[in-house]
Amino acid sequence: MSEISSNLYAHLRQAFPADLDAIAVETDAGQLYTWRDLDRGSAVLANFLQSLDLPQGSRIAVQVEKSVEALMLYLATLRAGFVFLPLNTAYQSAEIGYFFDNAEPAVVVCSAHNFAWVSTLAFKAGTRCVLTLNDDRTGSLLERAVHASDVHAVADNRADDVAVIIYTSGTTGRSKGAMLTHGNMLSNALVLKDAWGWRSPAQGGDVLIHALPIFHVHGLFVTIHGALLNGSKMIWLARFDPKVVLQHLPYATVFMGVPTLYVRLLGEPGLTKGLAKHMRLFISGSAPLLLDTFKAWQVRTGHTILERYGMSETVMLTSNPYQGVRRGGTVGPALPGVNLRVTDAHGAQVQTGCIGDIQVKGPNVFAGYWRMPERTAEEFTPDGFFKTGDVGTLDHDGYLTIVGRSKDLIISGGYNVYPAELESFINDLPGVAESAVVGVPHADFGEVGVAVVVARHGVTLDPAQIIVRLKSCVANYKVPKQCHVVAELPRNAMGKVQKNLLRSRFSAA
């Protein structure tokens, strides 16, 4: 990387095809963006951000609907040397307020219809500038940036400079901001380019169907970095619609999705081997892929889904092979450069096939949690391995099977749901003595949450009202699908709630 800056955008830009007037992005609304458009558009926005005279390392918080302009804003933040902070569009005021207070973003960009409440929270947290960006190419960001130059010198970042902060919750408190550096993301993108056999334009080229949101690792980094670093065209879908995906399948070669998307595609009669014959690769991640789905996809399409494993703190860690056996129910071996081990409670590696804690080390592993040095230290071993909090086994060929999550994480439809966060909201509701949230299997979403609540003495609680109250304060995907009021929670001799018993009791419901 000595010939150019370690800035991630500099490397993405270097990979753009020689013909900058070729199509880089085609939207489902028929809009066409060339590689030159991406470069010039991100340059305009980068120059505008720099004109605000922001301090070095300023955070740019973004909660907007999916659009190519939002992609340009991400690229602009990288090339200007600032720190990008993507926020789920489903987040409500209580969540957003915490992120703003914790990250103290210098600039906040939101959808125009959310400007009133978002700006109130942002200015309260000390934000200097709040702008709007909509998915129809309108908003004050574009209006104010229109006069900026479309020529921009990419910031000369070091590999260990923070490029992105991704908030990820834990089991003992509020969300933590995982700091990913330019080097973290570039190293992972380069590894995945080789591991997944991305075809260069000279080899016929790849075309990616992008049907994921762009506020998390899967949709923003894994997919987009892969396409840009390979100079590959993206078919850009504003939201996932199985029928729309099938319409574009004959014109693409790569699709990445969460298991829920594959389940819904399998529900379409139009999904056939003939329709998928031009596809090269289907990739699944962000949640466990059921073996039934894995096998059904093989039968219907003739393709074997490639399942992989990663985290907000590490980007991608393992992958079933592109060339080789893809084993259903596993997430494959560790990627090149990733050192992965499975250990017991004392940190000793367990024997092959035995269950233990998954720990990882490598250039893709994050720099730590934002403003949480003590928590960061707790999550790393003395010899520098990150404790993922996941539990799994390694077989004789090095394939990893994830069997559980020690941090009690629920993954619903590809989104992370943390019981401790929901329990804190439920426990604050009037009349609630205590609560427990557990994940139970679901055919479509993989898992969904179930809330189990104990009322204070003499109080009668309405489960439906608890769900309604939760919908007003957290993102909809986090809201438990059911709520049950019980006399008491099961506990062990140490007083700890036995969530395994709750899962067994309510999984059938």
Image (cartoon, grey):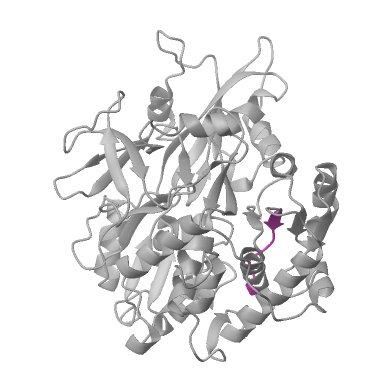
Let me know if residue 422 is in the magenta part: no
The vertical placement of 380 against 246, above or below, is above
Residue 360 vs residue 286, the one in the foreground: 360
- Considering the image in quadrants, where does the N terminus appear? bottom left
In the image, 130: left or right of 194?
right
The vertical placement of 324 against 446, above or below, is below
Does the rendering let one see residue 175?
yes
Q: Which residue is drawn at 60% across and 65% down?
A: 156
- Magenta region: 59-68
Let me know if residue 60 is in the magenta part: yes
The vertical placement of 375 against 256, above or below, is above
| Total numbered labels | 0
Residue 174 vs residue 363, the one in the foreground: 363
Furthest-front residue in this view? 2
In the image, 132: left or right of 305?
right
Q: Where is residue 91 in the image (x, y as percent from the top left)?
A: 67, 48
Q: Which residue is drawn at 74% across and 45% down?
A: 104
In the image, 464: left or right of 240?
right
Q: Position of residue 212 (x, y in %)?
A: 52, 63
Q: Which residue is drawn at 47% across and 52% down?
A: 414
Q: Position of residue 343 (x, y in %)?
A: 27, 32
